[in-house]
Amino acid sequence: MIDMIPIKTERELSVMRRACKITAAARALAGEMVRPGVTTKEIDKAVHDYIVSQGAKPSFLNYSGYPASACISVNNTVIHGIPDGRVLKEGDIVSVDVGAYWGGFHGDCAATYACGRISSEAQKLIDVTRQSFFEGVKFARQGYRISDISHAVQSYVEENGFSVVRAFIGHGVGEHLHEEPEVPNYGKPGRGPRLIRGMTIAVEPMVNAGTFDVRVLKDGWTTVTADGKLSAHYENTVLITDGEPEILTVTEGL
């Protein structure tokens, strides 16, 4: 432990890679299901059943009382959308956030998918959000600081005319779904903990088409944009190494 940030051993990482691959495959399955006429509850059931079929547990189910296996957030819902009977429509954008727990470790990842044909603005929002993750991860290397990632994400998003959510941030991930360090998607560079080989972090830009302000609905989970405009989300679990960062939430080799 360095400043309370867990450093994973090679043995732990071999287990965590499996958990992350299951998580990534669940995300991919959910993405394939996004089409007009499908309900968010149907997607959630498929995610649950797949994770369980791999001998894992859905990380989100009953986490602090959360009632589902996936967070499925449509259009102006930023995060923590609770799956229900909502029927997806042509033109929707659908963010899917999933986690799987296997062998004592969690994986965590998310992406936003187009439902049928979507507007050019919505597509740009999805593309910028995804690319902002990769801009940030350029700095997910030993010797940089957490806020170097944060600054790169924010800079790219704002250069493209969008805003980064501040009320929710990325985090460490490992034996716990949320652990140290906090990984904001905004801020000045050169601040926060220094990155060290063996850290595993969830880098997850949440990007709004309008203001960065959000509000949480009465259910205590569903978080929407304050101005009603669209939001997108992209996340992977990332390992800090001696060199290039390793994205753990990939399906290769599963």
Image: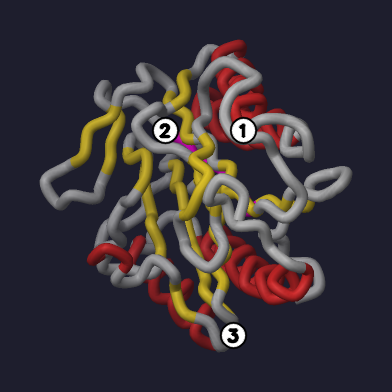
> 10 Å neighbourhood of mark 1: few (<14), some, or many (≥20)?
many
The residue that mark 3 highlights is 54
The residue that mark 2 highlights is 231
Q: Secondary structure at mark 1?
A: helix
> 10 Å neighbourhood of mark 3: few (<14), some, or many (≥20)?
few
Q: Nearer the viewer, mark 3 or mark 1?
A: 1
Image quarter hosting the N terminus: bottom right
Q: Is residue 3 above or below residue 86?
A: above
Q: Is residue 160 above or below residue 15?
A: above
Q: Identify the mark nearer the N-term, 3 or 2.
A: 3
Which residues fall within the magenta stretch?
231-237
The answer to whether the residues at label 3 and label 2 have Cβ atoms under 8 Å apart is no
**Residue that appears at 28% across and 29% down:** 214
Closer-to-camera residue (166/39): 166
The residue that mark 1 highlights is 146
**Residue that appears at 40% across and 27% down:** 166
> Gap in Å between the C-alphas at discs 2 and 1?
24 Å
